[in-house]
Amino acid sequence: MIYHACAVEAPLHVIFERLDDDLDTPGALAALFDFIREQNRSGIAPGQSAFDFLREVDELFDAFELETGTISDAAIEAELEKRRELRRADRYQEADAIRAALQERGVAIEDTPTGTRWWLRGEQGSDGACTVA
């Protein structure tokens, strides 16, 4: 399940509101921990918006060691090459597993008549989109 972006807007607003009020850091941290508590109670798996929320708060407080799980362009290209070879061999289930694994790591994949395009989510439309023939 994906954590909905609207659920992080309110606590983020409260955090900035508290900080704008004479730099009320304890109030801002209380709002952060309220968000974390509610997230844990919800039973819903955190999604990208929750991670983005924590990353934004971390930019303020430098309090977390967030692992971004970044993946290099070369690693993406290698996985897409394996996927292409599997598709040529009609091993679609294995090719789909590679696609799913890349998507879980934030890589958007688009198959086109001229090849496979990919980009990191949040960068679509940027010059960072790549094409694999």
Image (cartoon, grey):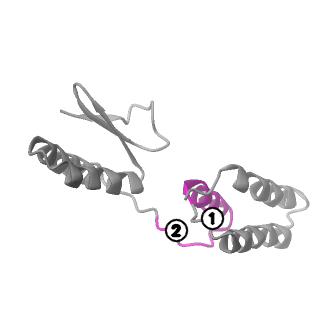
Compared across the picture, whether 98 is left or right of 51 comes to left
Residue 70 x/y as whole percent: 39, 58
Q: Residue at x 59, y 56 (%)?
A: 52
Q: Residue at x 46, y 39 (%)?
A: 123
Name the residue carrying label 2: 66
Q: Secondary structure at mark 1?
A: helix
- Residue type at mark 2 is Leu
Residue placed farthest to the left in the image?
89
Magenta: predominant secondary structure element? Answer: helix
* Number of numbered discs overlaid on the protein picture: 2
Q: Nearer the viewer, residue 62 or 98?
A: 98
Q: Quadrant of the N terminus?
A: bottom right
Compared across the picture, whether 45 is left or right of 78 comes to right
Compared across the picture, whether 31 is left or right of 51 comes to right
User: Is 50 a magenta residue?
Assistant: yes
Residue 60's quadrant in the figure? bottom right
- Highlighted magenta segment, given as a residue range: 47-67
- Residue type at mark 1 is Asp
Which of the labelled discs sits on residue 58, or is there none?
1
Q: Nearer the viewer, residue 54 or 41?
A: 41
Q: Is residue 112 above or below residue 108?
A: above
